Amino acid sequence: MNKIILKHREFKEKVIEAINNSQLPAFILKPVLKEILEQVEQIEVAQYDEALKLEQEEKNKKEEE
């Protein structure tokens, strides 16, 4: 869990640094960030679906035993 917390902080700092160093105006950054968020949301749904699938497989395995 500590590794995830550290990676989260490091990632956030790198994203902020990249945005600030880009020297791009907000009207360009906003749609890019929106697209990134949409992609992250798709990944989140896929990961959730995969977790449900794995949980169901484990449940089925236990029932078979």
Image: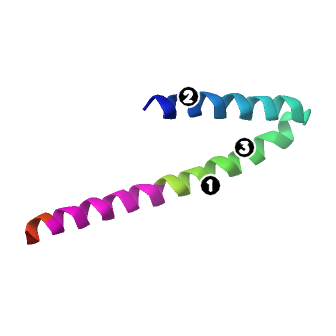
Q: Residue at x 47, y 60 (%)?
A: 46
Look at the image and tell me in which quarter the N terminus lies. top left
Q: Secondary structure at mark 2?
A: helix
For the residues labelled 3 and 2, the Cα–Cα distance comes to: 22 Å
Nearest the camera: 14 or 6?
6
* In the rendered image, the vertical position of residue 19 relative to residue 41, given as above or below: above
Q: Secondary structure at mark 3?
A: helix
Horizontal placement of 8 versus 46: left or right?
A: right
- Which residue does the numbered mark 3 point to in the structure image? 33
User: Amino acid type of disc 3?
Assistant: Leu
Q: Residue at x 69, y 46 (%)?
A: 34
In the rendered structure, find residue 39 and report the number of the disc placed on it. Answer: 1
User: Amino acid type of disc 2?
Assistant: Leu
- The mark nearer the N terminus, 1 or 3, is 3
Q: Per the image, is 63 magenta?
A: no
Q: Residue at x 7, y 69 (%)?
A: 65
Nearest the camera: 48 or 26?
48
Q: Residues within 10 Å of mark 3 (few under 14, many from 20)?
A: few
- The mark nearer the N terminus, 1 or 2, is 2
Relative image position of residue 54 (x, y in whole percent): 31, 62
- Which residue does the numbered mark 2 point to in the structure image? 6
Q: What span is in magenta?
A: 45-61
